[in-house]
Amino acid sequence: MNSSSSTPVTSTAARPVNGASLDQWLVYLESIHAKSIDMGLERVQTVKDRLNIQLGGVVFTVAGTNGKGSTCAMLESITVQAGYQVGMYTSPHLLRFTERARINGQEVAEADLVRAFEVVEDARQGQGVGTVSLTYFEFSTLAIVWLFAKRQLDVVILEVGLGGRLDAVNVFDPDCAICTSVDLDHMAFLGPDRESIGREKAGIFRSGKPAIVSDPAPPQSVINHAAAIGADLWLFGRDFNYSGDKQQWAYGGRNIRRGALAYPALRGANQLLNASAALAALESVRDRLHVPAQSIRQGFLLVEWPGRFQVLPGQPTVVLDVGHNPHAAAHLRESLDNMGFFPYTHCIFGMLGDKDAESVVNALKDRIDHWHLVTLEGDRGRTAEELKVSLQNAGVDAVNFDWAANAEALGKGGIAKQAPDKTVQTYDSVAQAYTVLSKAVSANDRILVFGSFLTVAQALQAREQLRKRPA
């Protein structure tokens, strides 16, 4: 895909005043560029050069259709346990913008982010050399990495936002690049097939530097690009792999074997693939970053990453998953199967309009009994009625059933056996659906919340509101 050729725009919005809050700055960031996504590096590179950002520690850049956030979280957890000063930048966030910027496992303070925004805005305005227009993502990327540079961290972990080659993160040179998986998503920006998308993600590779690929069957474009630029390509199954049983697992790399490892605290069918990618990355930079075996064990035991097959405590069982493409749905299906038996599985399902809802439904339709379809607001949102059409196109044979009315009439858990085997209901919001299910679902059942970061975030907010209500 080609870099954007759009003309930069100068915002008419007023810069936040001194003492403005983080929320006020975020509103401003949304107003200073004509597009929310504008692929290309020239504008970001210009402001980066003005800021003179220099990262002195070991830099990991992580791209991939799925699994990149979990891989970042494992790298962070292990290196923090090893005693290093570690910064991690990820996106998007679930509940708070500060989730995007963490130092030593803790979210950066809002005041520190505001200061970073002020510095980037000064550089963006240019002091007489011309204002550069930046998207929300580009601006916040520069601010957070500037903050990391000022802290002189030992390790910096950067998660690519979209693609790789033209993503704002790619203005920073990694010491090790990781590509976790390549599948169909964001095709309007990255290309129509895995080969095109793979080439975009391989754009984070650097000549002479390790390039870790944990996709078991990577597109040839990934391999070809690594060869073309002389990257040190590490392929899963050739240069590193894993094995395991129900109690423990082992990693095998080019020169290092690690046995008797505890399973990562992150749940999900694909986490050993992500864990082995993290260990391969650490092996590839071991001359600069010594990581003891005990730090690896503790790192895997303590790692947390909300929204990625996250199982909440209590009953009924609630599973949160931000997966929003067919590849993620296939792994979600496998992870659900590994949970054991539940009499009924309900799902709160909301997706954005540019996602392949029908293929996602196809992957999960025989694992879900009751569909609770929600409308997501915003320009990219998809309505519950549109999702209902996707279910019909995928061959889901479900009957309309008013869970809200029945739940109020019969009480919590009272209607599970009286409802049809396969049902569908539409809701105006995630909060409405979550509130209904909190009354209607039996303690032995399972609720899956999935389809988008927005869906999971709004479910978490609804859950918190319900917990605050008086009994």
Image: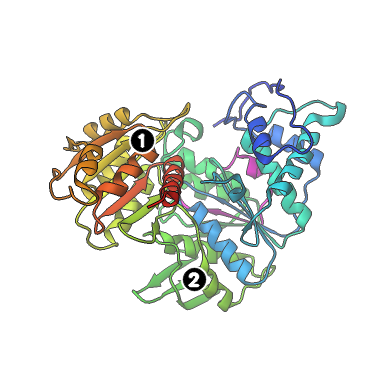
Which amino acid is tagged 2? Answer: Leu
Residue, x 31% and y 28% (percent of image)? 386
Residue 380 visible within the image: yes
Label ID, residue 180: none
Residue bearing the label numbered 2: 301
Quadrant for the N terminus in the image: top right
Distance of label 1 from label 2 (alpha carbons): 34 Å
Residue 281 visible within the image: no
- Check if residue 376 falls in the magenta segment: no
Mark 1 neighbour density, 10 Å: few (under 14) some (14–19) many (20 or more): some
Which amino acid is tagged 1? Answer: Asp
* Of 66 and 15, the residue lying toward us: 15
**Which color mode does the image show?**
rainbow
Residue bearing the label numbered 1: 356
Q: Secondary structure at mark 2?
A: helix
* Of 303 and 170, the residue lying toward us: 303
Q: Mark 1 and mark 2 in contact? Answer it, CB < 8 Å.
A: no
Camera-side mark, 1 or 2 = 2
The region drawn magenta spans: 164-182
* Residue at the far front in the pictured view: 470
The picture places residue 371, in percent across and down from the top left corner, at: 26, 41
- Of pointers 1 and 2, the one earlier in the residue sequence: 2
Q: Secondary structure at mark 1?
A: loop
